[in-house]
Image (cartoon, rainbow, N blue to C red):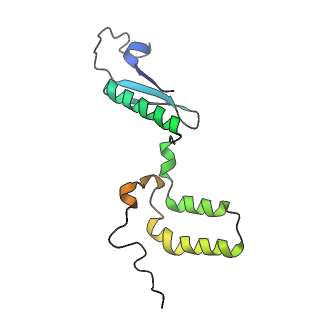
Amino acid sequence: MATVYQKCKTDKRSPHHPCARTRCGHPWSVRYRAPDGREKQRTFEQKTQAEAFRDRLTRDRYEGLYLDPKRGEITVREYATDWLDRQTIGESTYRNYESFLRIHLLPRLGDRPMGAWNARTSKPSPRPWHADWPRAR
């Protein structure tokens, strides 16, 4: 679980320790474990912000939604290439998938980070991304 604390009141190495004032104005920190097991920390100006972050981490972990934010930095191109290499499929299916990725998906979306997708970016645009495909006769 995550812990909310003020360094000036708990960390003896802090230059402000011990802070005798109740409302001193020093930043609040949230210490938590990332999915890879490493300990991380974020700092906030207000206690309410730190508690909200802690509560969101706890909720996401409980619901199985918490992922390392750095995982979203991988591009669609990297993910698609890795995904295609992991498939156990026949040769013709592999060629079919590879040509779709190479011709249609990667030229338009390949450099976009996977973490950039949300409800707004996923909505259809007035001009669909496949609008310039040749029409079947």
Left or right of 20? Residue 70 is: right
Give x and y (percent) for residue 128. 38, 72
- Give the quadrant of residue 122: bottom left
Q: Is residue 114 above or below residue 37?
A: below
Quadrant position of residue 12: top left
Q: Residue at x 53, y 40 (%)?
A: 64
Up/down of 49 relative to 130, above or below = above
Residue furthest front as drawn: 63
The furthest residue to the bottom: 137
Q: Is residue 21 left or right of residue 133?
A: left
Q: x, y percentage for residue 137?
A: 48, 91
Residue at x 49% of width, y 45% of height? 70
Quadrant of the image occupied by residue 130: bottom left
Q: Position of residue 33 (x, y in %)?
A: 53, 31
Closer to the camera, 124 or 74? 124
Q: Does 98 sit above or below residue 78?
A: below
**Which residue is rendered at x = 38% and y = 55% of the image?**
119
- Say which residue appears at 38% left-offset and 13% top-offset: 9
Number of labels in the image equals 0
